[in-house]
Image (tube, rainbow, N blue to C red):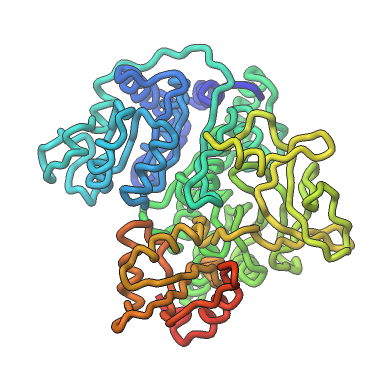
Amino acid sequence: MKENFATLLETVADVMGDRTAVIHGPRSVSFAELDRRASRLAGHLAGCGVGQESRVAIALYNGIEYVESVFAVLKLGGVPLNVNYRYREAELTQLLADAGAEALVFDATLDDRVAAVVPELPRLRALVRVAGSASGTASGAVPGHGGGSSGAQEGATPYDDAILSAEPLPRTARDNGHWLMYTGGTTGAPKGVLTTHSWLFDAVAPNGYALIGVTPPRSLAELAELTRRLRDHGPRLITLPAPPLMHSTGMYCTLAALLAGGTVGYLTSRSYDPDELARLIGMHRATVMAIVGDVFARPLADALDAAAACGEPYDLSSLEWILSVGVTWSADVKERLLRHGDFTCRDVVAASEGGPFAIALTRRGDSAVTSRFELIPGARVVTGDGRDVVPGSGEVGVLAAPADEEIAYQGDPDKTAQTFRYIDGRRYCAPGDLAAVEADGSLVFKGRDGRVINTGGEKVFAEEVEQVLLRHPKVDDVYVVGIRDDRWGSRVAAVVASTAADPPSESELRQFVGASLADYKCPRSVIVVTALPRSPAGKADLRWAQRIVTSSPSEGES
């Protein structure tokens, strides 16, 4: 549907009114409140000169403020920009500069980092600060009063002040609009996937309407009528996204629930707590839960098993779906989860650039197989020259799905041309996911091409970590590889060459990387040797590195 997403959400809010939209801990907001507060935040940003097509960065943890901020930016006709709150100063500066951010809504725990990067970003014209518990200030505290002061505080408007003091932005007609989602790329820096709201609607709908068995509306009038029917007769989605909203899985499940007139709830813990997630399912009578593969599923299975063994099982009776996108979700973990409830595991291969490419549905009693999927209609597995892989041939190809003409990487036409290819006269998205096709047509997922390490849903480019390690004065050479991990899917490991009399220790090197990069990019295992094997042309022997890391006695320590 070619409508601005703000207009879609306003249409739903008008129908749902006082029904609960978002829950976070003891707080909740109705659809009407969400709409009013987002309109006021939009009014504040407009008063700061933020408007049509302005990029507004959001560096927040999951919660009501995140949803309100996205809605506010959409109301402005602006473009929300997801920011990883774990980024250090250099990473944050690079992202905001690449996107051309004009405003930033950020959590108070990021005060020091924001204060450090603002002087490097002359386009930033507005800062809105959400006070957090770690800052020692209450939400809406006046900058510089209570909990100390920083450059970020002094230059920012407290979030609640921005909402309370501004006039609501009047509703207006809007065009299709742009949507921007940054994702880990294959060049070491995040890549902004720039597309339209009509693309976003198509990406969101399967996580909402499809789960309750209704056909997506094709107009605003149909949306209003469908929402009234769902309000009065159901069924109603109650969704718990466990992943961060800064990632597409968390965001798209949130938008899907709201668009379908449902309720979305978030964990209060800022690090994943599987017991809290299990408890909230019963508390909120959740029907849908979103996770990211084994990194979320395995600890959840452990928590469910432990509670059941103690004779105090968690109540999962309301749960109908567990959704996972993009990371390995092992068959044995699915089976463990299904012992605790009668729901469906929906495992999807997709990317921020496009898709979905393939899906696996597993129910209680099914024989689950890891990385075995069925192609989504329209998706293909193709060779480098555009041929379809022949089922049963054993040939490995690249997953490709139909793509709109508008979708592209922000400011990178070369990478856009590489990923979005024309096959048989039609444009496809093929970001590099490898797969083979069995004789029966089922798909065996092989992982991502290139050197991107997917660790718990976070994408790490090996060369970026290598470049940091090579800055260490005692490091002569380095390989960074991904090794299999039962919980995280993969984790980062490094083999470092040093000829120093007192070579660096593993902890020293990890701390060195941690000073420049986010924690998830730091090697979990580091092996120090005197030299690395390379070809005469200088080509790395990464298979050797994999063997060294996986056979080392320290492998598995963190």
Work out whether residue 333 or residue 487 is closer to the camera in this orientation and state it. Answer: 487
| Residue occupying image coordinates x 41% and y 52% | 267
| Residue occupying image coordinates x 68% and y 44% | 355
In the image, taking residue 337 as reference, residue 217 lies left or right, namely right
Image spot of residue 221 (x, y percent): 65, 17
| Residue occupying image coordinates x 85% and y 50% | 388
Image spot of residue 59 (x, y percent): 36, 42
Work out whether residue 492 or residue 181 is closer to the camera in this orientation and state it. Answer: 492
> Is 8 situated above or below 522?
above
In the image, taking residue 373 as reference, residue 264 lies left or right, namely left
- Residue found at the very far front of the displayed protein: 536
- Residue found at the very far bottom of the displayed protein: 553
Can residue 188 be seen from the camera position used here? yes
Can residue 262 be seen from the camera position used here? no
> Is 53 situated above or below 261?
above
Image spot of residue 255 (x, y percent): 54, 36
Quarter of the figure that contains the C terminus: bottom left
Quarter of the figure that contains the N terminus: top right
Image spot of residue 47 (x, y percent): 30, 17
Q: Residue 147's image quarter?
A: top left
Q: Residue 269's image quarter?
A: bottom left
| Residue occupying image coordinates x 50% and y 72% | 302
